[in-house]
Amino acid sequence: MSARDRSRRERYVRVECRLATAVGGTDGLYLDSILEASMCRRAKTFMESSHGDRHAYFVPSHGDSLPVDAVGKLPIPIVRARVGDLWIPRCSSPIFGETLADDAANYTTAFPLDKVEHLAESERTKIMQSGGRYKSFRLPLRVRLVERMVWFAATNHPPSELRRRLGQIRHIGKKTSQGWGVVAGWSVDLIDNDHSWYAESDDGPVLMRPLPADMEHPEGLIGARRGFGGCVGPYHDRRFWREIVEPC
């Protein structure tokens, strides 16, 4: 076995994120999605590399939709498995540590009317605050204060590579520009068993992440409920929503 083959063998890991602040928007905090978002910022660079064509990926401009055949093409250090027409990451949903606080915050913006003299004279005729450039809003955001979050995943890279990639991610969750989701540190530890999709328990296999409802699941699956939503990133994109089973 070559050194390259040894480095590509499948390993199982426990990934922990320690948080310095509350995290905003607790939906969709999937490790694969966090890694893909980080890679998107460098997609132009690796697409221009000598092996860029194998990823068949492009960076959509504002307002463009991601093509269906681009899903699962971003290179991340997590194994993906083909289920039907989707490449689903071998990575569990986030497992939150003890919740110290669970609240709602608001992020707002409003045009300061006392500063109107700083606008160009041509823009002072009408300032519309219900829409457009100077729209005012006040929107709620769920924030949860936890010390740590944990994921279980399968990787075909050395743990050091996953640590390196994660070490570049300083914020997670929504509205990080407002100070939410500051990462204090990451840890990646090897484990003996695969808990990415299912975990064994005394009562039977436990579902660990959303998966298509029509795929074959282990007998006696527990901790699952039927729903309709995404099981592959981008999780918010309704084109990829379907009947799923998800952890409960």
Image: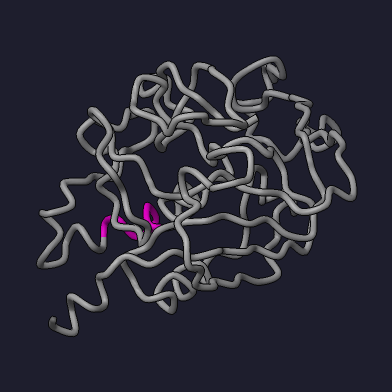
Q: Nearer the viewer, residue 106 or 13?
A: 13
Tell me residue 216's x, y (percent): 34, 28
Q: What residue is shown at x 53% (from left), y 47% (from top)?
A: 199
Q: How many marks?
A: 0
Is residue 156 part of the magenta span, yes or no?
Answer: no
Q: Position of residue 3 (x, y in %)?
A: 19, 84
Q: Main secondary structure of the magenta part?
A: helix
| Residue at the spot 63% in from the left edge and 17% down from the top edge | 131
Q: Nearer the viewer, residue 27 or 82?
A: 82
Indicate how the structure is coloured in the image: one colour
225 versus 162 height, above or below:
above
Q: Quadrant of the N terminus?
A: bottom left
Work out whether 38 lies above or below 94: below
Is residue 116 visible in this depiction of the protein?
A: no
Q: Foreground: 5 or 30?
A: 5
Whole-percent x and y of residue 54? Answer: 12, 54
User: Which range is magenta?
Assistant: 39-44
The C terminus sits in image quarter: top right
